[in-house]
Amino acid sequence: MEEFDQEKVIEEFEALTKDAERVQRETLKKILEENESAEYLQSLGLNGRTDIESFRACVPLVTHQDLESYIQRIVDGDSSPILTGKPITTISLSSGTTQGKPKFIPFNDELMENTLQIYRTSFAFRNREFPLGNGRALQFFYSSKQFKTKGGLAAGTATTNVFRNSMFKKAMKAIQSISCSPDEVIFGSDFHQSLYCHLLCGLIFRDEVQFISSTFAHSIIFAFSSFEQVWEELCNDIRTGVLSSRINVPSTRTAMSKLLKPNPELADLIYKKCSSLSNWYGLIPELLPNAKYIYGIMTGSMEPYLKKLRHYAGGLPLLSADYGASEGWIGANVNPKLPPELATYAVLPNIGYFEFIPLGENIEDRDHNNMESSFLRMEPKPVGLTEVKLGEEYEVIVTNFAGLYRYRLGDVVKVIGFHNSTPEIKFVCRRNLLLTINIDKNTEKDLQLSVEEAGKLLSEEKLEVVDFSSHVDLSTDPGHYVIFWEISGEASQEVLKECCNCLDKSFVDAGYVSSRKVNSIGALELRVVRRGTFQKILDHYLGLGSAVSQFKTPRCVGPTNNLVLQILCANVVKSYFSTAF
Ligand code: AMP
């Protein structure tokens, strides 16, 4: 077994972060040396130079779109050095929440190594505060299918590429993160069946489960809300030792049948526990008495689910996992004791070369009376990792070991502190997720705040917003914001009208408020959708080949995302227009 030396991992991290500036310089040099022969770099006239100044002078900032033609050639099987010196053999599909279609991103061994380094680093800090005993993890991991591209490259979501990598299992074992579910469940071809089996494995190994996790926290909430529907069936399987007929994927069925033995005592115990819970509060620690914490990405678009997660978690600590993307990892959560709302990520200076575009005006605490929108100003120059300033917001630019150079990730982060000389950043939002009609500009965060505010009116009725999204409707004149809500039960007309007004009023961006006052933006519309609509959206993304592990609800459905918009619109049961202005 691979030895895990917690203190050594922490020491290495301390050393790397003490001299982040030098490590960044060396990392860039290494990336450029390894990929000197790449056509892309050659065409930019670097001529073998590897210093930061030449790099910034020669290499432009790019988006995925700028690289699409290069990546497409790789996908189609051109094995000449295009973006990297060594040919790329694996492709990741990003979840593509925003654009509605997955993007192709190069994946290689270095990205895999980075992943393991991030896992080891955050585990070392986490385990120091919340040590695990011997046991297993209930991990809601789902691997999408890997397929071959036209050019013969293996392609799958980034999580799939990681889970299928030969180094993964060994590394997970070393950090006490072996799943209680067999591979046939993780790699099962039917997500709903895998979810059922994960739950069943969790119950079978209930005394051994040390923690519960998923990549993004949404999967954990989804799993336990499904548990509410199937718990009696699960108990029945355990009582009789016969697996439910709903599991019909042969490999999954065979693997699960080996684990399942008749155990009426366990079935009775679980039945009793579930029956005695009030509205499923504290479900997780009841089912899994030795779990120490719940672990997964809980920031950004996952924040709206925290309330529900806390409900299931009872008193169990929620620990946010790390920050990264299919394009590569960025930072590790080295302060695991902080609640998810305050979670920060310390950037690892050796896993890529990072730059940050200062955004000037903070999205989080912007001066709403300031009419001058930041997009009217010139975009400032990016700064280096150790040049960022405390309290400022930035857009992240990544240069990685897999052929992305000065790539705009599209995320907005805020510098909250420093760990030695590397910044600790908080994820703020996606930069391009904007509700905008004219001079108004509302981000994902603004939408979240507005929904939170209006959601308070629902909680007085003991109801909650299960999930939400938004859309700019320009088919009316003037255009207006549409907010889609799925609610946990039936709310009265009066309450929903109030919620609609509250949503409208809670977008406090000066551009929005002034436009609303003069009716250059129409009344906000709240559309309530049927229960289960957001699950249909999830299923839609799964159909596109994305994995549940990477799923993020699209908070704003753009005009190119027709199918999701259709699902939402087809399920509207009530709609209200604001009378707030
Ligand atoms: P994907 O495209 O599926 O690889 O997802 C990557 C994106 O997920 C990032 O660019 C972020 O927008 C988001 N993300 C990843 N990690 C976190 C995190 N810890 N907190 C908030 N958002 C995250």
Image: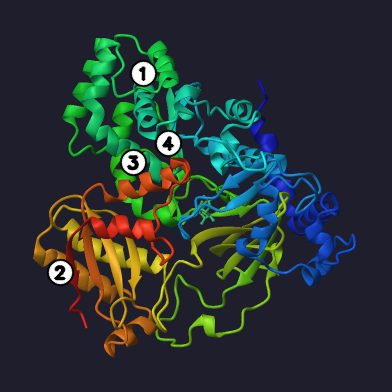
Q: Image point 36% across, 63% down: which residue?
A: 448
Seen in the image, is 377 located left or right of residue 470?
A: right
Tags 2 and 4 in contact by the CB under 8 Å rule? no
SS at badge 2: helix
Of pointers 2 and 3, the one earlier in the residue sequence: 3
**How packed is label 4: few (under 14 Cα within 10 Å), some, or many (20 or more)?**
many
As measured in the structure, the alpha-carbon distance from the residue carrying label 1 to the one carrying label 4 is 19 Å
Residue 128 visible in image: no
Of pointers 4 and 3, the one earlier in the residue sequence: 3
Q: Amino acid at mark 3?
A: Phe
The structure's colour scheme is: rainbow
Of pointers 2 and 1, the one earlier in the residue sequence: 1
SS at badge 3: helix
Q: Nearer the viewer, residue 131 or 220?
A: 220
Q: Image point 59% across, 31% down: which residue?
A: 164
Q: Amino acid at mark 4?
A: Tyr
Label placed on residue 222: 3
Q: Amino acid at mark 2?
A: Lys
Q: Is residue 460 above or below residue 539?
A: below
Q: Quadrant of residue 470?
A: bottom left
Mark 4, residue position: 293
SS at badge 1: helix
Seen in the image, is 75 located left or right of residue 78?
A: left
As measured in the structure, the alpha-carbon distance from the residue carrying label 1 to the one carrying label 3 is 20 Å
**How packed is label 3: few (under 14 Cα within 10 Å), some, or many (20 or more)?**
some
Mark 1, residue position: 204
As measured in the structure, the alpha-carbon distance from the residue carrying label 2 to the one carrying label 4 is 39 Å
Image depth: mark 2 or mark 4 in front: 2
